[in-house]
Image: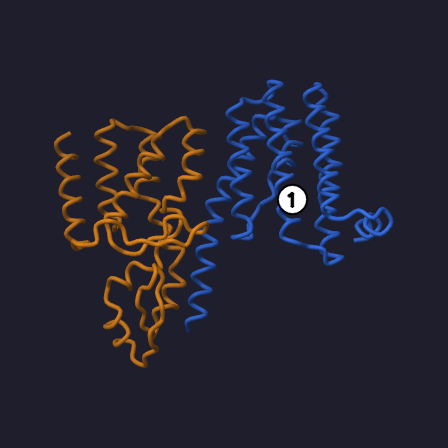
Chain colours: A orange, B blue
Amino acid sequence: MSILPHILVTTAGARVLGIEGNDLILAYIFGAALDLDHLIKIPLYRKKFKNKTYQVSEGRPKLIQKVEKKEHAYEVLGMGIKRYYTWRTPLQEPIALLWIIPLSLYLGSAIPVVFFLLHLFLDYLADYPKAPLFPFWGYSTTGPLTGSRIGLKEMAVNLISLCVIFLI
Amino acid sequence: MPIAAWVHETLGITPNQASVIAFCLGTGAVIAILAGQVGAALWILLLTMCIDGLDGAIAREYNLASKKGKWVDMGLDTANEIMLFFALAFMGYVEVTSAALASIAVILIRIIRDKSGFDPGLKRAILFLGYFTSFEFALQIIFFANIASFAIGTVIADYALQKKNDGEES
């Protein structure tokens, strides 16, 4: 999901749990700021989508044809593939629990794990390709809720979060 | 490397044998810690690390590198590090939790290293720093450095695969 639902859900979660101070910073790091990892993929993204068309296959884009005109490439791609594919890194996949759980144990706080799981839950509501256990297993999935539109899901999450924020 | 050549050609030691000798010496360091001789343990550890560096050198120089050898070296090094951390915990120099977390971190960095090619090497060598500061502090450095490197390693592996796929497709 985009950054806004993550921020709203983190804020709502922090309100519900009564989190303050340094714990609140931790909550925002693992609930929302993990999305900054997308910046790492910018160079690949720019290179990849210039004058080419792709389709998603097994969680990774496959080149289907080269095209001469840039506009054509964007037309064929559609926003879905363009927006989501290359952005994700294992920092926001379940495999990250391997380092987030020990970190939580070290800090003596469940906040990193709890807010990371919230982050994961929202991402897995969206139906773009995800590789939960990469680099140890190449399995990819689009998640359980592929039927409804991402915009609708985001709107519902935002609405529920705002209700929680204003009610508590 | 002249030392590696001498060890292999004169003494006839293979890379796997060097790994096992280093592990045995490392176990000696563990025993020294358990005997309360931390200073002696660190001298033994220094020797261990020197010999441990030879296995790779011999393997590369004499084209003896193998997947099995790499796993033997990695497994024995990790086992030795975990034994050292828990020996320190047993003697009260560090908390058991710190030893456990540092152990998890070194296991994680070892399993990702092949896929990412990234390992800062901050493991048992940091124990020397602990001798002059505190072992608790040293284990915290080991934990943070390796847990962060594991997280970075997963991103490196992902980026490398994506770059490779993009290259193959274009």
Q: Identity of the amino acid at label 1?
A: Val
- Residue B169 point in image, percent of width and height: 41, 71
Outermost residue toward the front in this view = B68
Residue sitting at 70 percent across and 30 percent down? B27
Task: Check disc 1 and report its element: helix, strand or loop.
Answer: helix
Above or below residue A156? Residue B37 is above
> Which residue carries the number 1 mark?
B72
Q: Which of A84 and B66 is in front in this view?
A: B66
Residue sitting at 21 percent across and 29 percent down? A16
**Within-10-Å neighbours for mark 1: few <14, some 14–19, many 20+:** some
- Residue B2 point in image, percent of width and height: 82, 52
Image quadrant of residue A78?
bottom left
- Residue A28 point in image, percent of width and height: 31, 38
Above or below residue A162? Residue A78 is below
Outermost residue toward the bottom in this view = A68
Image quadrant of residue A99?
top left
Q: Which of A7 and B38 is in front in this view?
A: B38
- Residue A27 point in image, percent of width and height: 32, 35
Instruction: Left or right? Give the position of B126 relative to B46.
Output: left
Residue sitting at 21 percent across and 54 percent down? A146
Instruction: Left or right? Give the position of A70 relative to B76.
Output: left
Question: Disc 1 is attached to a residue of which chain?
Answer: B
Above or below residue A137? Residue B106 is above
Image quadrant of residue B20?
top right
The number of numbered badges drawn on the structure is 1
Quadrant location, the C terminus of chain A: top left
